[in-house]
Image (tube, grey):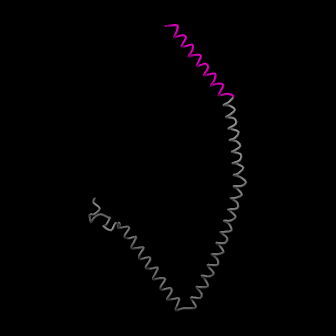
Amino acid sequence: MDESSPSSPRRASGLTTGQRWAFVGAALLAALLIAGVVLAVVNLSRNPDQTEMIRDIVIILLAVESWFLGLALILLMIQLARLAALLQNEVRPLLDSTNETLGTLKGTTVFLSRNLVRPVIRINSSVSALRRVLDLIRYGRSD
């Protein structure tokens, strides 16, 4: 189906029908919010006693919120201190132990290479050279 046809859900503006409805809904919600704020300001300016009461309630709510934020910050600092202690006391010894193990493994590898692998390679190369010499001697006799 062609997108430019009138029966297509996509219009010339590039918005589908669902997107248009979402846009209209968001615009209506924004308009209602602005109208509500304007009505609240007008109502509060006509009733100063009610305005003072709402102001006091908002101040109390902000104080409670500040208290909760302070408590959350204290808990965050405690968790950071615990994490630092964990890294210092648990992870660093683990890394030191791992480095020590790697050093031991490297030493073992060097020891085995010098005392086992090199002699075996030398013996195998000597045996291979001897076989080649014997093969050459054997082929030389048959000619």
Q: Quadrant of the N terminus?
A: bottom left
Residue most toward the left?
5
**Most prominent secondary structure in the magenta stretch?**
helix
Residue 135 within the magenta-colored segment of the rendering: yes
Left or right: residue 20 versus residue 92 is left
Residue drawn at (70%, 64%) of the image: 78
**For residue 54, above or below residue 65:** below
Q: Nearer the viewer, residue 39 or 122?
A: 122
Q: How many marks?
A: 0
Residue drawn at (69%, 32%) of the image: 111
Residue drawn at (66%, 25%) of the image: 119
Point out residue 116 in the picture as x, y percentages from the top left corner.
67, 27
Examine the image and state in which quarter residue 108 appears: top right
**For residue 92, above or below residue 129:** below
Q: Please report the bounds of the magenta region as a residue range.
A: 115-143
Point out residue 125 in the picture as x, y percentages from the top left corner.
60, 22
Point out residue 114 in the picture as x, y percentages from the top left corner.
68, 30
Point out residue 59 in the picture as x, y percentages from the top left corner.
62, 82
**For residue 42, above or below residue 101:** below
Examine the image and state in which quarter residue 120 appears: top right
Residue drawn at (41%, 73%) of the image: 25
Residue most toward the top?
142
Residue 114 within the magenta-colored segment of the rendering: no
Q: Nearer the viewer, residue 1 or 130?
A: 130
